[in-house]
């Protein structure tokens, strides 16, 4: 799978210019590059069937699972972390969490989510990251979204970059706390009807 764009909404404070942030970025890029389809191939080829109709298109959960496995197994991230952000019961678990060190504040966390829900879920994920930085709970956060070229072949209405893009200035202006907030935009290396559709479930994991 290829990374086609990184949208940095804001980057300020000690973590933003640190070697730790560069290493986090390197690990995310590497994990994305390890997502392949079909299993055992050296790239990510998608079956170009529209996901508009029920039972058609490609699933998103197995794609996420492959990236999460790379973050955990290769780079030591913690998955499905129960890390408190927000009041009451909080905002729920984070897909992947990594320890980072800040020169001024000691240990903190970096949060990553790979969007498998609808566009409302993408908004919640970004809000969670912002709230975590406002509360001083995390040093930064990022979400992974499919590009406009990939989205039509996935489960209909799944979160995607073109639909979140009109709102980016909101998050840029809403947070004045130190931290880093970014969106990693991904898409297929190739398209072919000769490859199977990606299952709509947790099976079908493929790692380079």
Image (cartoon, rainbow, N blue to C red):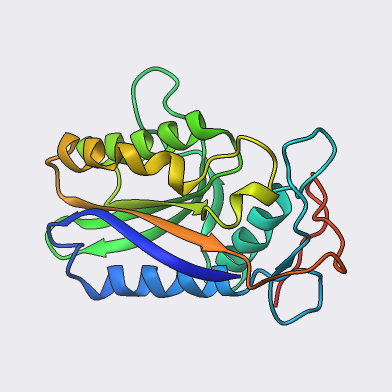
Q: Is residue 3 left or right of residue 151?
A: left
Q: Is residue 37 left or right of residue 156?
A: right
Residue lying at 39% horizontally and 17% vertically, measured from the top left: 88
Please provide percent x and percent y for residue 10: 20, 52
Q: Is residue 72 left or right of residue 132?
A: right
Nearest to the observer: residue 190 or residue 181: 190
Above or below 116: residue 190: below
Nearest to the observer: residue 107 or residue 133: 133
Residue lying at 68% horizontally and 57% vertically, measured from the top left: 63
Above or below 115: residue 73: below
Please provide percent x and percent y for residue 183: 39, 54
Q: How many marks do you count on the picture?
A: 0
Residue lying at 53% horizontally and 55% vertically, measured from the top left: 78
Please provide percent x and percent y for residue 54: 81, 33
Which residue lies most toward the top here?
Answer: 88
Nearest to the observer: residue 191 or residue 208: 191
Above or below 103: residue 140: above
Image quadrant containing the N terminus: bottom right
Which residue lies most toward the bottom here?
Answer: 42
Image quadrant containing the C terminus: bottom right
Q: Is residue 30 left or right of residue 126?
A: right
**Image quarter for residue 173?**
top left
Please provide percent x and percent y for residue 186: 52, 62
């Amino acid at each position: 799978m290829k990374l086609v764009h990184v949208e940095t909404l804001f980057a300020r404070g000690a973590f933003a210019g640190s070697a730790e942030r560069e290493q986090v970025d390197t690990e995310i890029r590497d994990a994305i590059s390890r997502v392949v389809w079909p299993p055992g191939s050296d790239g990510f080829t998608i079956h170009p069937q529209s996901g508009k109709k029920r039972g058609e298109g490609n699933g998103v959960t197995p794609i996420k699972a492959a990236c999460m496995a790379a973050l955990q197994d290769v780079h030591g991230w913690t998955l499905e972390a129960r890390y408190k952000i927000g009041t009451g019961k909080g905002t729920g678990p984070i897909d992947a969490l990594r320890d980072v060190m800040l020169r001024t504040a000691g240990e903190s966390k970096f949060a990553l989510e790979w969007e498998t829900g609808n566009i409302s879920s993408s908004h919640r994920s970004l809000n969670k990251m912002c709230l975590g930085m406002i509360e001083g709970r995390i040093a930064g956060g990022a979400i992974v979204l499919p590009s406009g070229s990939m989205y039509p072949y996935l489960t209909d209405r799944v979160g995607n970059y073109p639909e979140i893009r009109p709102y980016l200035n909101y998050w840029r202006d809403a947070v004045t706390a130190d931290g880093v907030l970014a969106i990693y935009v991904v898409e297929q290396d190739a398209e072919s009807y000769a490859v199977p559709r990606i299952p709509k479930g947790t099976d079908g994991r493929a790692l380079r």
